[in-house]
Every structure is written in C-alpha cells, then in structure tokens.
Image (cartoon, rainbow, N blue to C red):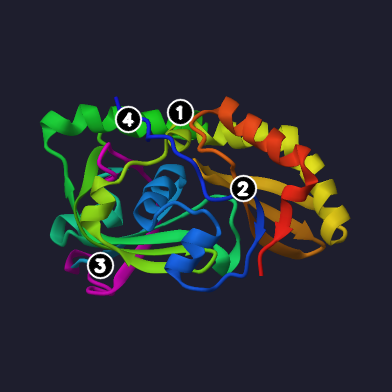
Amino acid sequence: MLEFPAPAAGPLKSSGLNLSPQSGGVENATARCDLPSPAVAVRNLVEQAQYAHLCTIMSAMHHRRAGYPFGTIVDFAADGAGFPIFSMSPLAIQTRNIMEDPRCSLVMQMPGWSGLANARVTMFGDVYALPKSMQSAAADIFHQKMSITGDAKQRWVSGNAVYFRMDRILDIYFVGGFGTVQWVDVCEYSAAKPDQIVVANPLYTLQVLNQTFSEPLRKLFSEAYGLTDDAAFISIDKRGVDVRLRRGGDYSIERFGFDTEVESLEDAVSAMQRLLSDVSLLKVRS
C-alpha cells in the first residue's frame, strides 16, 4: 500500500481569492497565487489526474506507420516515488510498441480544467514491464487508485494483464496555469511529496466543497463582478483551491488561497468558512 508522510505545516503569505492574469512567469505566478512549487504541483497533478495520453513509437511489427508516434488513452497510477504504473494487455498496440522500444511520452491533465488553460504535465521516459516479483504490488497500487476515483466497477479485469512502469523519467514539462510553464528537474520531482490533502481522496473533498460552498461562492462572485452562472471547485492543494467560473459560455479558472495549510477535508471546510465569512478577502490582483 502507498504511504505518504504528511507535509510540515506553516504560515502562508496571504489568503483570499486571487483573480490573476494567466501570465507573468513561473516565480511570479507561484508567489502571486500562493501555488505549490512546480515540483510539488506536478506531484499533486499526477495524483489527481484520472487518465493519461500515452504516446509510443509504432513498431515495425505492425507493418504500417512504423516509427511514427502512436497515442492512446490509458489508466495509470503513481507509485510512492511518483513513477507512473500502467495495466496493459499483451495484445494492445502500445504494449507491443513498448516491448520493441521503451521510449514514451505521457501527458496527464488536471480534471475539471478546460481548453488550453488546462493544467497538464508531459513526462518523457522509458517504460518497462515490471518483474513478476513486483506485479502484485503494482496491482495493489493501481486498484487502490481505481477505488478512489470510483472507476473500479467499470474496469474489466483480465487475467493476462501485465503491469508496466515508467522506470526512467528523463524530463518533465509542466503547464500549470496562472502563468506557470517550465521544465521541472526530475530529481526535484522525485524528492518532492504530494500534499496530504491530495492523497486523502481529493475527489470526495472536492465533492463536499462543491455541495457546501459552490452556491454561496457563485452568489459572492455575482455580487462582486457581475452575474456568474456557476462556480465549481475542481482541484485542491494544501495552499488553496482552484475554482472554475462560468459566465454564459465563457469559463475562467480562479484561485482561492487558504489562510493556513490544509491536510484534511475538515481543514479545507474550515478554511473556506473563514474565507467566505469575510467579504473583504474577496479581492482582485492586477
């Protein structure tokens, strides 16, 4: 089973809603929006992403398009070090491609974001089948994530499925929204830990936040900035939550910064209650 140590708590620079332009550079965006460091943000995204786009190199055995990239959507889970694990059928095209050439790229994106503003990460690396001695442990990690995302009942179970792992990550390219775009050092990524609030069933946490605060937040935005049709909590970390606003057919992603770091659902609910109890915390950052 996966075990993640809880991050150390500490004070934050500010709190409240930051209506921020989607530009300004990595360091400026990280400080301005109270975002996690890029390495931690990638770890958080990898934990929350539900699917990934896996691109392999088409093998010669298919006798067509050999050498071209082949992309497909796959389920995945991350192990304790943040390395992606896949469950693949030996008959799948991507599996046969990997067996001939392990070089792959993997694109993961944050659920709930939309369009080109979508927070996403691309990993470049080599994927190999795990040895038999590690297949059972990989299955435990994989199915643990499926149970958290609620997809376990929808997954077919195959007796010949083989678990693969991106054993060697060569590079990481991160587009985090709010102006955060950069290459992330692989060693920094491997050393980073995802926030405890992210590994403690974040989908359920977001569900509770939406049920409790979505309508009050929508009304608050409408009063401050004009009619807002919907406000949805779509991602969370220990420093804050990201909210998708809809005004007619237009969408934007805004950031709530917490006044203290959160580790649990109870912490997140309390932080949101404090923020919404003081309208003065609703402020625009230019």
- Looking at the image, tell me whether mark 2 or mark 3 is earlier in sequence order: 2
Q: Is residue 140 above or below residue 189?
A: above
Eye-nearest disc, 4 or 3? 4
Q: CA distance from mark 1 to mark 3?
A: 32 Å
Q: Are marks 4 and 2 in contact (CB under 8 Å)?
A: no
Structural crowding at the residue carrying mark 4, measured as other residues with C-alpha within 10 Å and reported as few (<14), some (14–19) or many (≥20): few
Q: Which residue is mark 2?
A: 15
Q: CA distance from mark 4 to mark 1?
A: 21 Å
Q: Which residue is mark 3?
A: 58
Eye-nearest disc, 1 or 2? 2
User: Which residues are the magenta region?
Assistant: 60-84
- Looking at the image, tell me whether mark 1 or mark 3 is earlier in sequence order: 3
Q: Are marks 1 and 3 in contact (CB under 8 Å)?
A: no
Q: CA distance from mark 4 to mark 2?
A: 25 Å
Q: Amino acid at mark 4?
A: Pro
Under tag 1, what secondary structure? helix
